[in-house]
Image (cartoon, rainbow, N blue to C red):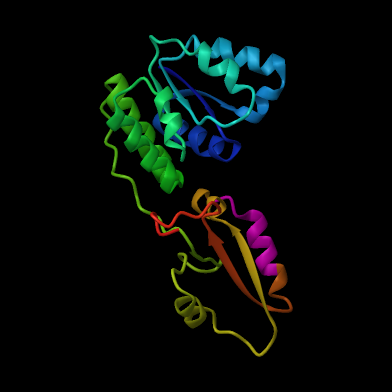
């Protein structure tokens, strides 16, 4: 069973790992790869061999060629924070909405369960997907802590500040949710040689309705 995805670069590792865990044959593309005309040509060819296609559209020019090339006989699920992009989907609306919930919360388990859910609904597989896990939108993180902290008070109680200057570090929630933290961890541990550190992550776009 071959699947094809065209998404943002940050989503590629999660999709590929989820597909490996589930034994799915996924050919995954980042739209930034498709700035190369040869790569775009290969991608368009791969779409014709797909059983189901997952896309995360953007404003980049490559989508002007990708979207008209989608085969109406092959199911397409389009996920995006912009609901206008959902119209590209060719599956029932409730499937598109649920896939978007999985992706919005992010993280390896949500992406794995999203693939399980999408394959069940569209291709008739019998995976056992769990509902989307509602991860926090902002918090404080430290590589030595077991989990993130939702309030400053919780973090300070765990961290135990010393009598020295304190540095604030802000990074994207995407890095935390996706477990892409090597650079963040290195920065925190290096800064701690001289300072206390408050490493906060947040949802960069901001969304009052979500509480982000």
Q: Main secondary structure of the magenta part?
A: helix
Image point (64%, 59%), residue name: 184
Q: Position of residue 11 (x, y in %)?
A: 53, 38
* Residue lying at 64% horizontally and 24% vertically, measured from the top left: 61
Is residue 135 positioned above or below 79 on the image? below
**From the viewer's perspective, is residue 146 above or below residue 71?**
below
Which residues, given as a range, are shown in magenta?
Answer: 179-189
Q: Is residue 175 left or right of residue 148?
A: right
Question: Does residue 195 appear left or right of residue 71 in this picture?
Answer: right
Q: Is residue 23 magenta?
A: no
Q: Residue 35, how many percent across, how many down? A: 70, 24
Residue sitting at x 46%, y 66%: 146
In terms of depth relative to the viewer, which is nearer, 106 or 95? 95
Left or right, 179 with respect to 116, comes to right
> Which residue occupies the foreground of this view, 31 or 109?
31
Residue 183 location, quadrant: bottom right
């Amino acid at each position: 069973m071959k699947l094809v995805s065209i998404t943002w670069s940050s989503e590629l590792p999660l999709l590929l790992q989820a597909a490996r865990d589930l034994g799915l044959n996924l050919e995954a593309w980042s739209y930034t790869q498709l700035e190369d005309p040869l790569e775009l040509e290969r991608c368009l060819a791969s779409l014709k061999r797909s059983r189901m296609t997952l896309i995360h559209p953007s404003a980049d020019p490559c989508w002007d060629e990708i979207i008209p090339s989608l085969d109406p006989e092959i199911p397409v699920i389009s996920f995006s924070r912009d609901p206008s992009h959902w119209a590209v989907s060719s599956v029932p609306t409730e499937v598109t909405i649920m896939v978007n919930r999985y992706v919005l919360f992010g993280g390896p388990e949500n992406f794995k369960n999203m693939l399980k859910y999408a394959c069940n609904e569209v291709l008739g597989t019998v995976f056992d997907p769990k509902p989307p896990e509602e991860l926090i939108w902002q918090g404080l993180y430290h590589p030595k802590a077991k989990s993130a902290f939702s309030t400053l008070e919780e973090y300070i109680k765990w961290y135990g500040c010393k009598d020295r200057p304190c540095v604030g570090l802000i990074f994207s929630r995407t890095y935390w949710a996706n477990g892409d933290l090597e650079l963040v961890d290195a920065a925190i541990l290096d800064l701690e040689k001289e300072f206390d550190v408050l490493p906060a992550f947040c949802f960069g776009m901001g969304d009052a309705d979500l509480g982000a």
